[in-house]
């Protein structure tokens, strides 16, 4: 009985970690919006093919393999995607590209669309909060803040070069997403948990540092989803013509003598 107790304790810890990962990820309405915005960054043919399979892709997206969710939960606590986790992620990513190359086009496109959950998880500052995590209620209020401010968040191309990645460059790109997300987690923690209390998202507006984090993380996620899709679509020799054009946004010039 004594020998079995550590095993039961470890199992309980793993269940808690997995539950935390599932609870503290982009809520379904936000994830759906992220996916639709990401489709705007891919070629017209891929946009259409993914949009036609949106419903089965969303359904499959919500069934992340538990063992993979557990690996991610562990690694996101430390901030480093370890080799077993990266190997599992690469296997997930290679599956749709292989299906497409083998002529299983519809099945491969559903799997490709569903793969959006992967870069979405890695780009989420809540999931990248580290071992310290967040007090209960902070994640809920943060996501509520993002959702209530979507109309004010401009979708920008966070990393244009990532849209040209080869599939073998994805693991390094995924780790970079975690690094950038982790750097923003402290802002959420400090701004949304003040004097021992969770801050109501309705008390914050676009002038809050939380808005800056929300805006950056939203655009990072949109770009990361599109980058992952494109790298695998490229590997499968998909049509890359009719790529959408982006519009540069240049900050207004300051008047002479005005400090930034």
Image (spheres, rainbow, N blue to C red):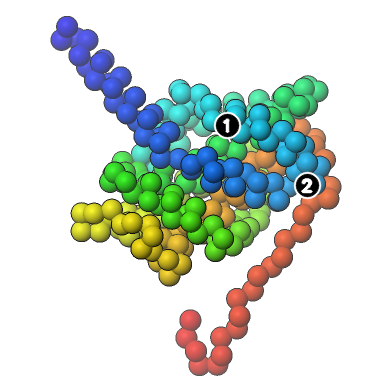
Residue 185 showing in the rendered view: no
N-terminal of the two: label 2 or label 1? 2
Q: Label 1, on which residue?
A: 61
The quadrant holding residue 22 is top left
Instruction: Give how far across and how far down residue 217 sits, in percent.
Output: 50, 54
Instruction: Give how far across and how far down residue 165 sits, in percent.
Output: 67, 45
Mark sitting on residue 129:
none
Q: Is residue 6 left or right of residue 161?
A: left
Instruction: Give how far across and how far down residue 146 sits, in percent.
Output: 47, 54
In this view, the residue in front, 199 or 182, is 199
Give the crowd class for mark 2: few <14, some 14-19, many >=20 residues within 10 Å: some
The quadrant holding residue 231 is top right
In this view, the residue in front, 182 or 134, is 134
Q: Is residue 40 left or right of residue 79?
A: right
In this view, the residue in front, 59 or 256, is 59
| Residue at the image point whose x is 66% and y is 33% from the top | 55
Which type of secondary structure does the marked residue at label 1 adopt?
Answer: helix
Mark sitting on residue 43:
2
């Amino acid at each position: 009985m004594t020998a079995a107790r550590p095993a039961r304790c470890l199992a309980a810890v793993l269940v808690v970690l997995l539950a935390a990962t599932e609870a503290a990820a982009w809520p379904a309405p936000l994830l759906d919006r992220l996916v639709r915005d990401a489709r705007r960054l891919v070629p017209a043919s891929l946009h259409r093919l993914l949009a036609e399979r949106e419903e089965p892709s969303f359904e499959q997206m919500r069934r992340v393999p538990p063992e993979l969710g557990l690996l991610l939960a562990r690694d996101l606590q430390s901030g480093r995607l370890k080799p077993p986790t990266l190997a599992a992620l690469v296997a997930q990513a290679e599956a749709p590209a292989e299906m497409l190359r083998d002529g299983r086009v519809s099945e491969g496109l559903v799997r490709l669309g569903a793969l959006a959950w992967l870069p979405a998880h890695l780009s989420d500052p809540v999931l990248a909060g580290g071992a310290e995590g967040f007090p209960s209620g902070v994640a809920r209020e943060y996501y509520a803040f993002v959702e209530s401010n979507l109309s004010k968040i401009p979708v920008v191309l966070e990393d244009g070069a990532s849209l040209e990645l080869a599939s073998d460059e994805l693991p390094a790109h995924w780790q970079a997403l975690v690094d950038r997300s982790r750097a923003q987690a402290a802002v959420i923690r400090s701004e949304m948990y003040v004097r021992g209390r969770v801050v109501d998202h309705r008390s914050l507006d676009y002038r809050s540092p939380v808005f800056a984090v929300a805006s950056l993380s939203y655009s990072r996620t949109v770009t990361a989803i599109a980058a992952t899709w494109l790298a695998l679509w490229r590997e499968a020799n998909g049509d890359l013509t009719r790529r959408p054009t982006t519009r540069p946004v240049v900050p207004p010039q300051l008047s002479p003598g005005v400090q930034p």
